[in-house]
Amino acid sequence: MESQHKRNKYNLAICLLVAIMLPIASFAQEVREKSESVMIYFKQGSSVIDRNFMDNGENLDQLVEILEPYILTGVKTKGRVCINSSVSPEGSATINKRLVNARAKAISDWISKRFGVSVGYEIAFQGFDWDLLLTLAEESSELPHKSEVIDIIKNTPEFVTRNGIVVNERGRKIEQLHGGESYRWLLKNLYPRLRYAGVETYVLYAVELTITSPNPACHGAEGGSAVITFKKNVDDKYVPVVRASESWVTDVKATESQISYTVEPNPMAQSRTSVITVEAYGTKHEVVVEQEAAAPAVAVKSALPVAVGAEGGSVTLAYETNVPNSTTTPEVTTTAEWISDIKCDEFGTISFVAAENTALEPRSAMLKINYMGTEQEVCVEQASADPQIIITSENPVEMGAEGGSAAVAYDINVPDATLTSVSTDADWITSIKASEDDVTFKVRRNRVDEPRSASLLLESGNLVSNVIVNQALSECNLPAYLSLQTNLLYDLLITPNIGVEFYLGKNFSVDANWHYAWWKNDNTHFYWRTYGGDLALRWWFGRNARLKPLTGHHVGIYGQMITYDFEFGKDGILGDRWTYAAGVEYGYSLPIAERLNLDFTLGFGYLWGEFYEYKPIDGHYVWQATKHRRYMGPTKCEISLVWLLGCDNYNRKKR
């Protein structure tokens, strides 16, 4: 097969040049020619391209790989396709020539359809490829009468004239040899390899150099050496011509595989750019070289380190940048909590506020100045404080008119020092207690119509500090004691209810409650209807009741009235007239939050009323009996969540 491919190349010299790709534009880029060949095989007497026949599938894919880079990528080039066809020795010359033309056209049409371009061609008619048949016969170990077949191929003329007619003498003798035994074997095993069309592609392509290094090439302000790598679509020792547009890119040199250069250090606080031009094969390529700005970008002109007094306050620093006409301001940060309100303007000023240093030791912090990607640190040093009592919580202390408990946190910046005394001349500030960390006290309710103020004097040896206590005037819009409540037991029975209790004074109160529920489901004969209420007069007693109304133990008398209708599937009872009850009660109201109590009440009394028994039958409620209820025993049970209302109506221990 190798000899056949070589022979085809010589025959292709007569092929027609065919434009199968984009026209060559007028450019100075170097162009070279590349040639490759592919063999396509056909079945006997057929001009149809069958991918599954012999090696056609692999060879057609190879043809696509040869042509595709030049047709599909739009490379500026021209090319030519030549088709050299051969047939097997059987058949007439006329039929074989027609078959050669059909096969060549089939290949042209296949290329045109595959790539969407019109492909012309010219045929170099190979005729009967006896040389290839001789090679295949000599290589075969199974050919019947092999030596005789080889002798016919070598020593018998291909064509002779009989009775004025030119005939294929070699083919005729092979067909007649031993009754056609050798011919039939050749027809099946070797002749198919003679039915081929050799496709030779000649492609004119542009010689190219491609930069493979990152573009742009980025460098730090410190500069340094670097290389630019490239690849060529030809294997040669060509060296491109290179040069840089800026003088700070030096020692630019090229070899046949890469370009080296050196970037000098950047002394400026601005980035800069240069271009390395690469000339090769008549084309130019540019590689951008970018270099970062130098650091530092900002310089503080004030004296360093920055000195701050123990009292703190506003501090201003002057700065300048080495970037001309820049309107970008530095970003200044710090991790020190005692430095705040940092500001920076475009006029060269940095300001911040230093908190007071209450410690007996000096302290320092670092300001980080970030400007255009660079960072500089400036040290701030603050002097130590004098010995003192430092109030660390809010001063003055603001209290509401209702008064209550308060605390003042303090610190003495003298090691092992403690408070020796805490005093005040205000009689409405009581229960003053001092600990190692704070001073606690209580403020009585302000019942006058104007605010008031007093001071606490904290002393430790010869150290003194004052705390101002301000109390607002009384603005109570609801001076009475009252509460709203709901019975949680009723709530569990899905019976909404609400109650209200008024404090009458002298440990007496009036309690009123109301409930209402109407739930029904006619399909399941479920009724749950009840409404009514109760009214109680209570007397509060015990220690908690003396401290605050509506809290602690209570006893009382009560009256109740309710109606009801209960039905659960079959039987129902209906009390559509009032059922009454009266009795005595006992309870206890337990504080659970500042304005929430939990009240437990149990009442014993007498209950009386009339009710009906009925059954649901055929969509009607049929009366069964009328009865009277008389009952002595528990008639009231409450576990109520109580919301305390009124300016002074709250649980002080729960604040």
Image (tube, rainbow, N blue to C red):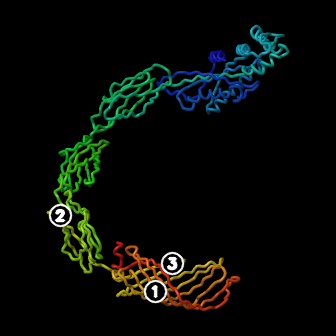
Quadrant of res 445? bottom left
**Could you tell me which quadrant the N terminus lies in?**
top right
Measured from the top left, where is residue 468 in percent x and y?
21, 69
Pick the residue in front: 81 or 254.
Answer: 254
| Residue 169 vertical position relative to residue 220 in the rendered view, above or below | above
Number of callouts: 3
Residue of label 2: 460
Question: How far, Cα to Cα, is label 3 from label 1?
Answer: 17 Å
Tell me if residue 105 comes above or below residue 348 in the rendering: above
Percent x, y for residue 42? 72, 25
Q: Looking at the picture, which amino acid does disc 3 mark? A: Leu
Residue beneath disc 3: 489
Looking at marks 1 and 2 on the same chain, the residue that comes earlier in the sequence is marked by 2
Residue 87 visible somewhere in the drawing: yes
SS for callout 1: strand
Question: What amino acid is found at the position of numbered circle 2 in the picture?
Answer: Ser
| Mark 3 vs 2, N-terminal side | 2
Q: Could you tell me how far apart the alpha carbons at marks 1 and 2 are, in whole angstroms? A: 58 Å
Quarter of the picture containing the C terminus is bottom left
Q: Is residue 92 visible?
A: no
Residue positioned most to the top: 155
